[in-house]
C-alpha cells in the first residue's frame, strides 16, 4: 500500500481558444443537466417537458421574445458598464447603485422639469443628468482608491445602499398619490420625458445597447485608453514604469463605468418602466459582475453569457408559475449555472497531471 | 420622550443577527477570504432551521414537543445548511482558485434564492394543510428568556430579556476574539490572511486554515439567520424579510476594523441605527425616515475612508484579502 496517487497542479502555458470554450461548453451542459434534475425533483416532470416550458417562457410568443431580448439588453448594458473597471482589476460591485442613481436623476428631470421645458429639452436634461449622476457615483470610490488605496469592493458596496435609501427618500417625496409610497407611472397623460419609441416599445433600448457593445469592444481592444486599462490591470507597477498615470486611469475608467451605468438607469426609467422603485435594478448590478467575468471581459462573449442567464431566469419563472412554485426558483438555477462555470475556469487555467509515485515522501 | 428602556432591547434584537454575521465574516476574512456570500449563507441558515422545525412540528403535536429536540433539530439543520454553503465557497475559491468576488456574489444569489424558494414553496412541496409557515411553538423555545427577567424592572428588560441565541452570539464573539488574538491557532490564521506564502514557508497548512476558517465562519453567520427567524420574527418566515442585513454584517466587519469583540457593541449600535427611524419624531414627514436608514452605510463608509487614510498597520484589512493562493505562482 505504498503507492499513492499524487495530483500535480500547474498553470497551463496557454490553451487554444476552442479547447477553453469546449471546457466552458461542457460545464454549461453539465449545469443544465443538474438544473433539470433539481427541477425534476421539485416538480416531478420529465426533463424534456421542463426545458420546453423554459423555452416557452423565454421565446414562446412574439411578445415574450421581445421582453427576453429587452431584458438581455439591460443586463448586457450593465455588464458592459462594469467591464472596463474589471479589466483594470477594480472590483466595482456598485453597478446596482450607479444604475439606480442614474434612474433617480432621470426621474428628477421627468418630474421637476415636466411643466417648465418642452419635451425634447427634458429628454436632453435627462440624458445629461443620468450620465453625470452615474459618473459621480463611480468617481467617488475611484478617487479614494487612487488617493488612499481605499478598498473599492467594500466602498462600492456601501454606495449601493446609500443610493437605495436616497431613492427611497425621493420616492416618498414625489409619491403619487400622497401616502401611496410609490411614484406610479410618471407623466402618464403627457408622456413628457418618455424616450421615443422606435417601432415598438422594446427596440430603443435594444439598439442603444447593441451600439454600446460595439463601441465598448473597440474601446477596450483598439484604443489607447483600452490598452492602458489592460496594463494597469496586469500590474500597476509595470504601468507606472511605462509612464502611465495609474491614478488618472483608475479615475477615468471608473467615471466611464459609472456613466454607462447611469445611461442604463436612463433607459430603465425613461425608456422601459417610466417609474422609479428602489428595486428597479433588481440585482442586475450584481449579476452583471458575473456576466462580465464569465465572458472573460469580452463584450461580444457577454452577449451569450447574459443571454444564458436571462433565458434561464425567464424560463424558470415560467416553470414557477406553471407549477405554482415561488419565483425565486430562477435564482437557484442561476446559482447552479454560475457555480459550474466558475468551477470550470480552474480546468482552463490549470492542468492536472496524475503522478504515480512510490509512498515515502520527502 | 426618547424611551431608552424599550429602545435598547429592540436595538439588541436587531443587532444579534449582524453580530453573528460579522463574527463569521471576520473569521473568514482573517484567512484572506472575502466571502461576499454571507448574505446568502444567512438566508440558508435561516431557511434550513425553518425546514427542520417545520418537519418536527408536523411530526409531533405541540403538547408532545421535547424542548431539547425543538431547539436541537433546527439548530443542527441550520448549521448543516450553512456549512454546505461554506464548503461550496471553499471548494470553488480555495481548491479551484476561483475569483472570490464572483463566487461570493453567486453564492448570495443562490442562497437568497434557496431561502425565498423554500420559504415560499415549502407548504406546496410537502402537501401539508397549514396556511403559512408559523413555527410559534418552536419559536417559543428559542425566545424563552430567564424566568425572573420580568421581575427585575428595567435591568431585566435591558439585559435579561433575550433568548439564548443572543447570549450565544456574544459568547461566540468573545471566544473568536480570544482565539484570534491570544492563541497559536489565531496567530497562524492571521498569518495565512496576511501573507500565505510566508505562512506556507513556516509550515502552516494554508489550505486547511482557509477551509476551516471559511466553514466555521459560515456556520456562525448561518446562526444569525436562524436567530432572525426563530427569535426576532417569532418563527414566521416571510420572503425577503431578512432584507439587506447580510450586507450590513459585512459593513460591520469594516466598521469594527476586523475585531469581533468590538463587534458586540457595534452590532447593537448598528441595530439601533437600523430602527432609529421608528423613534425619531418626524411628524407626518415619512420621507426623512428613509434618510435615517442610510446612517449605518454612511458611517461605515466614513470609517473605511479614515482607516485607509491613516494607514495604521493594525487597522488594515488582511493583506491578502480577496487573493487566491497558489504556491507555484510568484
Image: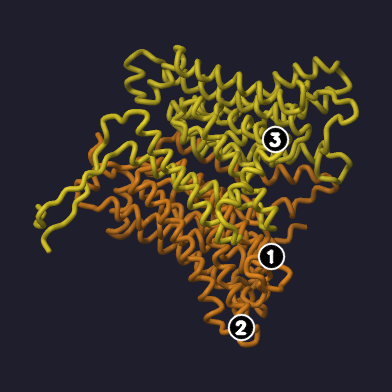
Residue at mark 3 to residue at mark 2: CA–CA distance = 48 Å
Camera-nearest label, 1 or 3: 3
Alpha carbon distance from label 2 to label 1: 38 Å
Q: CA distance from mark 1 to mark 3?
A: 53 Å
In the rendered structure, are the residues bearing label 1 and label 3 in contact, judged by CB atoms less than 8 Å apart?
no
User: Circle 2: is it few (<14), some (14-19), or many (20+) Cα within 10 Å?
Assistant: few
Is residue B17 something that shows in the picture? Answer: yes
Asked if marks 2 and 1 fall on the same chain, the answer is yes
**Residue name at image x 44 percent, y 12 percent:** A224
In the displayed structure image, the side of residue A115 where residue B125 appears, left or right: left
- Tell me, for residue B5, which label it has, or none: 1
Please state the horizontal and vertical placement of residue A164, each as a whole percent of the image: 67, 40
Chain letter matching colour yellow: A
The image shows residue A48 at horizontal and vertical percentages of 57, 51
Q: Residue furthest right?
A: A189
* Residue A127 pos. (x, y %): 71, 20
Q: Label 1's element?
A: helix
Amino acid at each position: 500500500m505504498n503507492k499513492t496517487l499524487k495530483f500535480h497542479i500547474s498553470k497551463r502555458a496557454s490553451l487554444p481558444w476552442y479547447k477553453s470554450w469546449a471546457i466552458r461548453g461542457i460545464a454549461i451542459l453539465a449545469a443544465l443537466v443538474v438544473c433539470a434534475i433539481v427541477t425534476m425533483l421539485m416538480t416531478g416532470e420529465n426533463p424534456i417537458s421542463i426545458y420546453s416550458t423554459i423555452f416557452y417562457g423565454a421565446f414562446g410568443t412574439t411578445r415574450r421574445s421581445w421582453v427576453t431580448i429587452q431584458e438581455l439588453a439591460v443586463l448586457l448594458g450593465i455588464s458592459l458598464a462594469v467591464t472596463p473597471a474589471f479589466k483594470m482589476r477594480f472590483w466595482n460591485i456598485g453597478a446596482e447603485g450607479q444604475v439606480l442613481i442614474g434612474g433617480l436623476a432621470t426621474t428628477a428631470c421627468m418630474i421637476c422639469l415636466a411643466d417648465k421645458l418642452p419635451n425634447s429639452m427634458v429628454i436632453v436634461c435627462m440624458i445629461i443628468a443620468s450620465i453625470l449622476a452615474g459618473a459621480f457615483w463611480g468617481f467617488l470610490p475611484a478617487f479614494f482608491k487612487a488617493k488612499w488605496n481605499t478598498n473599492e469592493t467594500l466602498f462600492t458596496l456601501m454606495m449601493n445602499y446609500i443610493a437605495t435609501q436616497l431613492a427611497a427618500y425621493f420616492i416618498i417625496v414625489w409619491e403619487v398619490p400622497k401616502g401611496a409610497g410609490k411614484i406610479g407611472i410618471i407623466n402618464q397623460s403627457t408622456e413628457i420625458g418618455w424616450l421615443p419609441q422606435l417601432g415598438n416599445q422594446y427596440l430603443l433600448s435594444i439598439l442603444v445597447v447593441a451600439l454600446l457593445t460595439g463601441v465598448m469592444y473597440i474601446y477596450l481592444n483598439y484604443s489607447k485608453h483600452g490598452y492602458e486599462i489592460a496594463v494597469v490591470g496586469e500590474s500597476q507597477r509595470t504601468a507606472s514604469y511605462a509612464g502611465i498615470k495609474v491614478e488618472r486611469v483608475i479615475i477615468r475608467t471608473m467615471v466611464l463605468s459609472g456613466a454607462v451605468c447611469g445611461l442604463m438607469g436612463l433607459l430603465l426609467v425613461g425608456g422601459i418602466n417610466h417609474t422609479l422603485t428602489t428595486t428597479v435594478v433588481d440585482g442586475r448590478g450584481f449579476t452583471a459582475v458575473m456576466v462580465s467575468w464569465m465572458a472573460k471581459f469580452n463584450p461580444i462573449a457577454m452577449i451569450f453569457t447574459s443571454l444564458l442567464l436571462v433565458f434561464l431566469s425567464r424560463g424558470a419563472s415560467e416553470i414557477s408559475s406553471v407549477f405554482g412554485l415561488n419565483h425565486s426558483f430562477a435564482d437557484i438555477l442561476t446559482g447552479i449555472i454560475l457555480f459550474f462555470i466558475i468551477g470550470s475556469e480552474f480546468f482552463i487555467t490549470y492542468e492536472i497531471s496524475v503522478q504515480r509515485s512510490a509512498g515515502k515522501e520527502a | 420622550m426618547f424611551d431608552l428602556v424599550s429602545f435598547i432591547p429592540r436595538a439588541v434584537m436587531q443587532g444579534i443577527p449582524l453580530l453573528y454575521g460579522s463574527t463569521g465574516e471576520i473569521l473568514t476574512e482573517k484567512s484572506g477570504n472575502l466571502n461576499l456570500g454571507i448574505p446568502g449563507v444567512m438566508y440558508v441558515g435561516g431557511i434550513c432551521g425553518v425546514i427542520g422545525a417545520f418537519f418536527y412540528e408536523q411530526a409531533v403535536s405541540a403538547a408532545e414537543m421535547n424542548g431539547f429536540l425543538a431547539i436541537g433539530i433546527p439548530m443542527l439543520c441550520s448549521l448543516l445548511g450553512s456549512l454546505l454553503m461554506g464548503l461550496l465557497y471553499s471548494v470553488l475559491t480555495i481548491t479551484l482558485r476561483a475569483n472570490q468576488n464572483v463566487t461570493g456574489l453567486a453564492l448570495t444569489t443562490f442562497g437568497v434564492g434557496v431561502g425565498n424558494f423554500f420559504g415560499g414553496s415549502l407548504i406546496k412541496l410537502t402537501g401539508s394543510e397549514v396556511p403559512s409557515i408559523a413555527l410559534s411553538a418552536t419559536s417559543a423555545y428559542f425566545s424563552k428568556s430567564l424566568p425572573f427577567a420580568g421581575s427585575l424592572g428595567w435591568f431585566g428588560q435591558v439585559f435579561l430579556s433575550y433568548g439564548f441565541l443572543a447570549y450565544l452570539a456574544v459568547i461566540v464573539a468573545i471566544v473568536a476574539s480570544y482565539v484570534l488574538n491570544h492563541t497559536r491557532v489565531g496567530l497562524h490564521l492571521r498569518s495565512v490572511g496576511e501573507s500565505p506564502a510566508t505562512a506556507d514557508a513556516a509550515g502552516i497548512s494554508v489550505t486547511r486554515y482557509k477551509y476551516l476558517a471559511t466553514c466555521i465562519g459560515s456556520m456562525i453567520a448561518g446562526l444569525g439567520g436562524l436567530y432572525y427567524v426563530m427569535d426576532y420574527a417569532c418563527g414566521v418566515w416571510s420572503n425577503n424579510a431578512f432584507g439587506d442585513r447580510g450586507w450590513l454584517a459585512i459593513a460591520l466587519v469594516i466598521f469594527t476594523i476586523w475585531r469581533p469583540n468590538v463587534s458586540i457593541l457595534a452590532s447593537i449600535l448598528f441595530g439601533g441605527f437600523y430602527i432609529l427611524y421608528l423613534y425619531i419624531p418626524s411628524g407626518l414627514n415619512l420621507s426623512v425616515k428613509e434618510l435615517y436608514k442610510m446612517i449605518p452605510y454612511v458611517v461605515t463608509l466614513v470609517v473605511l475612508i479614515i482607516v485607509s487614510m491613516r494607514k495604521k498597520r493594525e487597522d488594515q484589512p488582511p493583506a491578502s484579502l480577496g487573493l487566491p493562493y497558489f504556491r507555484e505562482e510568484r
